[in-house]
Amino acid sequence: MRNSLFIMILLMMVGMVAVNSAQPVRPTKAQCSDERRDGFSACKFTLIYRLPPSAKCCRRIRETHTECVCPLITPKVAFLINVNWALKTIRKCGREVPRNFKCGSITTPPI
């Protein structure tokens, strides 16, 4: 169960790979911790059941800093993530994902 929860949290985190240029100030460790916790809470049904994201989940996806998420995407985690599904979810929430964007061990597709 704990391993499943860990995987779900990481799946949610990779769903937030777009660049957040509106906020040039680097977040603190405490802010990142809060963003990850709030993101999982807001998006857990999207992650677990692959339901469409709620308004609260989309708001969290749009506001989360990549600096809080990308360092956690190791090669092991990247292996577990369905990048196309994550990108589709991000775009449904109105957040752009740059082509060839590097987030941890994942690089978004060029198309």
Image: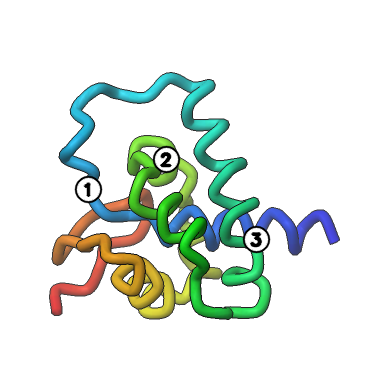
What is the distance, in whole Å, between disc 2 and disc 1 at their CAs? 14 Å
Residue 105 rendering spot, x and y as whole percentages: 37, 55
Amino acid type of the residue that numbered disc 1 sits on in the rendered structure: Val
Quadrant of the rendering where the C terminus is positioned: bottom left
Can residue 76 be seen here? The reply is no
Q: Quadrant of the N terminus?
A: bottom right
Tell me what residue is drawn at x 23 percent, y 43 percent: 20
Nearest to N terminus: mark 2 or mark 1: 1
38 up-or-down from 78: above or below? above
Where on the picture, by quarter, is residue 89? Answer: bottom left
The residue positioned 54% from the left and 62% from the top of the image is 11
Residue holding disc 3 = 7
Residue 19 lies, in percent from the top left, at 22, 48
For marks 2 and 1, give the one nearer the viewer.
1
Task: For mark 1, give the secondary structure.
Answer: loop
Amino acid type, mark 2: Pro
Q: Are marks 3 and 2 in contact (CB under 8 Å)?
A: no
Q: Is residue 103 visible?
A: yes
Residue type (three-letter) at the residue carrying disc 3: Ile
Q: CA distance from mark 3 to mark 2?
A: 15 Å
Horizontal side of 66 relative to 110 (left or right) equals right
Which numbered circle lies on residue 2? Answer: none
Q: Position of residue 47 (x, y in %)?
A: 60, 69
Secondary structure under the numbered disc 3 in the rendered image = helix
Up-down relation of residue 77 to residue 89 (above or below): above
Please indicate whether residue 100 sits to the left or right of residue 29 in the image. left
User: Residue 19, labelled with which disc?
Assistant: 1
Secondary structure under tag 2 reads: helix
Which residue position holds label 2? 71
Q: CA distance from mark 1 to mark 3?
A: 23 Å
Callouts 2 and 1 close, C-beta under 8 Å:
no
